[in-house]
Structure formats: structure tokens, C-alpha cells
Amino acid sequence: MHSAHVPEIVVSRLPVYLRALTEMKSKNREITSSQELGDRLGFSSAQIRKDLSQFGEFGKQGTGYNISFLMEQLQRILKVDRVWDTALVGTGDLGHAVANYAGFLDRGFRIVVAFDNDPKKIGDKAGPFVIQDVSTLEEEIRNRGIMVAMLTVPAEAAQDLADRLLRAGVRAILCYAPTSLSVPNGVRVEYIDPVLHLQDMTYYMPE
Amino acid sequence: MHSAHVPEIVVSRLPVYLRALTEMKSKNREITSSQELGDRLGFSSAQIRKDLSQFGEFGKQGTGYNISFLMEQLQRILKVDRVWDTALVGTGDLGHAVANYAGFLDRGFRIVVAFDNDPKKIGDKAGPFVIQDVSTLEEEIRNRGIMVAMLTVPAEAAQDLADRLLRAGVRAILCYAPTSLSVPNGVRVEYIDPVLHLQDMTYYMPE
């Protein structure tokens, strides 16, 4: 079951549930409850049951959720029961940090190519990847059938590179640059903006 | 007006509104509408009016919102009408990227100190900051009255450093490490987890 009518905010919580379940499983836990998940994540148990019920019946009244089973279902729903080849564009400090981040592969993503426009960097490595000239971007993206990209470039370069990625077939961009990208309908963009999180927290600080 | 009953999800949208307004202002725009904001951000205009109405009356029917005025109000509500001294813990690639990020100061945050535990790094610079020995963390945090910190350390080091930050007076932590921190009530933690955003996008990808 995969409804087009599930609100985006509900979808955005599924990865959070999956991450919590993964942590439980890593501690050899087998069963959890909407109450425990809610306590852990700061949602009500009713919210969690309601969110999950949009996609099917994953638990039994009184016996809770089988962690492995629920993980598999969420991975399927989020389409991370496969591995998405991913392009990294920009290999400054942030690009290097992203290239070295070990947490992508077992959560559905594998960086397979890294680009930069600095001739001095081409041929060097960013994490395990040989940095390629960004002039080959369209060709590499098309040849590899890459649909997911991460943009770790300066804000002023982001829109042009996003346009190039989309023309080559990318359909989802995670943008680390502090800017807003303009993209056509049907393309997904998400932003890593640390200040959004900081401002959200200071709201709760004492005067 | 500052209600304790505003849902967290509403609060979390205010920084997004503020960012959009800031971009409009940078293009010398003076007036906007809930319709324009909604179109830009992918929310309904009703949602935006409802969110803002939780905090007061910021626009007039038919004339829209004065961008500068609404920005000031949101900055006040989010408590970023001041600048929060912020500590950076961890100066690997990611810490360096964060230290060099130019987008904090004009949005309410100023990194004032950076720590690492690597003796070879102490005294070097991360962005404009001299890296200090993490053994001085408690003393520095207390002396400077720092309440906000960013953790760019490996996952296995994050909880211990969070505990130390909190004991020294920090009340809000932005955690880049792929882990969940356990913190007491009244302390805020937010996470930068790129995979949450990637998984949210692959949900919408064609099969």
C-alpha cells in the first residue's frame, strides 16, 4: 500500500522511526511498542500508531511491533530496501566530511562519484573517491543512471549545478549550500541548514 | 505573546519562514503574502496564517505582511534578535567546514571557541578559531556563559562530550554525530543527519 495522499510531514517522520528501530536492533532488541518509540522520540504513541497505520498493519494489539519486521517494511516504503548510487558535487572541507561519512551505505545510499571544478583537486581523493572534473558531470550522471546527488558547493554555484544535475537525470538533491534552489515539479530537494535547528532550539531557551 | 502550548512542529517552521523572508528582503522586497510564502515553501497559505496567528497579528487582511516587520517579530520569538555565543566541539573535516561557515552570525549565532582532543591540533586554527584542548571545555564554557554547542565528533565520543557540555551549562546541542544523545528534560538536542533527508526523498522516487 503506497498512498499518494500521505502528508509529507508523515513521510518525513518515517526515517526517524527507522533510525530509532535500527538503534534498538543493534542492541539486540526484538520487540518494541508505540509507547516506547514515542517516549524515545518525543511523539505521542497515538501519533506513531496513526502514522504507521497509513501504510498498513505492522503490529498486533498487546504484542507491539516486531523490530526487524517493521524495519523491513519502513525500508520498503522509503525505497531504501535497495542502494541508491549517489553523486557528491563539491569537495571542500564539507565534501570531504561527507565523502568520509560511514553512515550512508547501510541506510540505502552509496556515493559512487565525486566532482570538483578546481583543477588542483582533480585526481586527488575525497574519502575513497577519485575527484573528477565537474565538466564530466552530465556524462557520468547519465552513464551511471544516478538519480540522487549531494551538493556541497558554495551558495552562488548551487543553482547552476543543480540545473546540470537535473538535466542529466537526477531527481533528488540534498543541498548543503545556504540557498534555496528552484527546481521543477517532480524533483525533490532537501536542505541541510544547521541554523534552522539552532533557531528552533533557542526558542525554548530561558529569556 | 509566547505560549508554552505552541506545538513543536509549528515552532520548527518559524526558522523556515524567517529564512524565506530574509531571502525576499535581500532582493529588496517589502511586502509578501501567506500565499506567496506558501507557494515558495510548499505549505498552504492557511497553514502559514495559522502558524503565525499563534504568536500574534502580523499582517493585515488584503495588504499582506511587511517583510521587515515580520522578520523582526520572528527573530524576537525565536530569540535570535540577539547573538548566542556557541562552542564547536570537534575539528575534523566537518568541524572545519562548520568553523568556516559564514552563515551563523547574521542569523543569531557566533562560534567563540573550538575544541579538540588531538594534541597535534591544539593551537592550530579551525576557521578563525584557535583550537583549544578539550580538557579546558568545562572551564571555558562556564567562564564564557555559553549555552549553545555544536558537536562534530565521532559517534562514540558524542554522549560523553554532551554530558560534559551540559554539566558546564549548555542547554542546546546541535549534534552532527550519527547517534542519539540521552539528555535530561529541559535540554534541547537537534541532529544533523543527512540520511533522514535522503530517505525522505527516495520515498517519492519512481519504482
Image (cartoon, coloured by chain):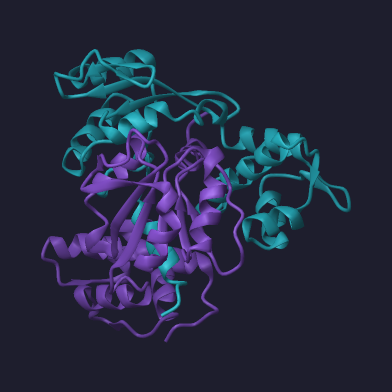
Chain colours: A cyan, B purple
Q: Return the residue nearer the eye: A114 or A181.
A: A114
Can residue A176 be seen here? The reply is no
Q: Which residue corresponds to the image point at 42% horizontal and 54% vertical from the top-left?
A: B137
Nearest the eye: B94 or A193: B94
Report which quarter residue A127 is drawn in: top left
Q: Residue at x 35, y 17 (%)?
A: A129
Residue A89, compared with residue A155, is above or below; it is above
Please provide percent x and percent y for residue B76: 32, 77
Q: Give percent across and percent down for residue A101.
A: 44, 30
**Quadrant of the rendering where the N terminus of chain A is positioned:** top right
Q: Give percent across and percent down for residue B30.
A: 15, 72
Describe residue B110's horizontal placement relative to residue B13 as left or right: left
**Residue at horizontal 21 percent and vertical 51 percent from the top:** B102
Q: Residue furthest left?
A: B28
Left or right: residue A80 compared with residue B65: right
Q: Quadrant of the C terminus of chain A?
A: bottom left
In the image, residue B40 lies at what x, y percent?
30, 57
Q: Is residue B72 above or below residue B165?
A: below
Marks counted in the figure total 0
Looking at this view, name the residue that lies furthest to the right.
Answer: A62
User: Does the rendering let one see residue A109?
Assistant: yes
Residue at the location (48% across, 55% down)? Answer: B190
Query: Foreground: A91 or A71?
Result: A91
Relative horizontal placement of residue B180, taking residue B104 as reference (left or right): right
